Image: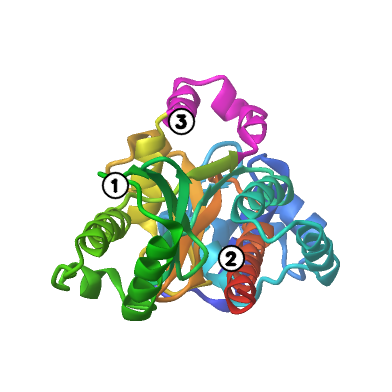
Amino acid sequence: MKKLTKRQKTILMLVVREYIDSGQAVGSKSLVKNYKLDVSSATVRNEMRALTEMGYFRTTTGRVPTEAGYRYFVSEVMRDANLPSAVQRTISHQFAQTHSNAEEWMTLAASVLAHQTQAVSLVAAPRNEQVLFKHLELISTQGRQILMVLVFVGGDVSQQILTLAEVIPQARLSQVAERLNQKLRTLSAEIILASPPRADLLEQDIFLLIQQEMLQRSEGASGEIYMDGMVNLLAEPSFADSDEGRRTLRFFDERSRLQDLLSSTVVDNRVGGVQVLIGGKDGWDELRQCSMVLAKYGIPGQATGTLGVLGPMRMPYARTIPTVRYMADLLSNLMTENLSGE
């Protein structure tokens, strides 16, 4: 595509910004008046015509950004968009009031994202990238039943009630648990799955159960998705009153497709890296009138998730992009602090 002049870049950025703010097609006269440009409206009109021919605008009674126009705008905004310090402090204070509870963090993150961006928020709970054994407890409950508590690095816990062939004293259960703790502590699922069975029959049975649990977790699907802000999408006339909008709204009822969407769209694998998808994504026809701003968060190599927002193409990117980036960094820091404080 032809390289833009400095004036064309300025006009392109102003048209997109004006359209995002007003929702109305932008004319050359209003652009000169609102932004006190030191050129005539005829000059601006000529530049807007050239930008239209290049595919950045489409014409109605004025100029409206195309997907290419939005993409150019986003590429410029991504460089230096920052969330105001006052907003950062407000969000940080909200999280300071929560407990060290992942579910509470996810729920609050979805609420904050929806409120700050006025879009639909999506927060996928973190998934273990590498399942690591941390600790095992075997607790006698009643008769032949025992409680097996399996703890993983990162804080995930699995609890199972087991019925043994015979009553086993607590002292022996504790001995078996201690031996397994010594042998397996911090080992990955891959290493444990490749390990030979244990000699002691009780220890062997417990070890096989540990292997099964770690296999399930290493092959598990993406975590639960927390959502908020559907009312923001319903408030958009283009969504609430059109077939296109209704198809988009129905898409949110299919959680498995949402999980597929979040896992397949984050190309930037860096934690904290923000990705903007304008016009949906190939294969997701319901989202072709939408934009998504997504980021990965968590602890690289241990547990990561995806968060972001979905809304109309006429999205306030200059506000949305830094909000998503800040939320990803904040959740990553919370997870790291929680892990180090175990």
Q: Is residue 159 left or right of residue 22?
A: left
Instruction: Tell me the residue that label 2 is attached to.
Output: 328
| Contact flag, marks 3 and 2 (Cβ < 8 Å) | no
Residue bounds of the magenta highlight: 228-253
Badge 3 local density, few (<14 within 10 Å), some, or many (20+)? many
Could you tell which of marks 3 and 2 lies nearer the N-terminus? 3
Kind of residue at disc 1: Asp
Q: Residue at x 23, y 56 (%)?
A: 205
Instruction: Tell me the residue that label 1 is attached to.
Output: 282
Could you tell which of marks 3 and 1 lies nearer the N-terminus? 3
What secondary structure is found at the residue carrying circle 3? helix
Q: Does residue 191 appear in the picture of this structure? A: yes
Kind of residue at disc 2: Ala
Q: Residue at x 51, y 21 (%)?
A: 242
What secondary structure is found at the residue carrying circle 1? loop
Residue 220 coordinates in the image, percent (x, y) = 31, 52
What is the quadrant of residue 60 in the picture?
Answer: top right
Give how far apart the Cα atoms at labels 3 and 1 are.
15 Å
Q: Is residue 136 left or right of residue 21?
A: left
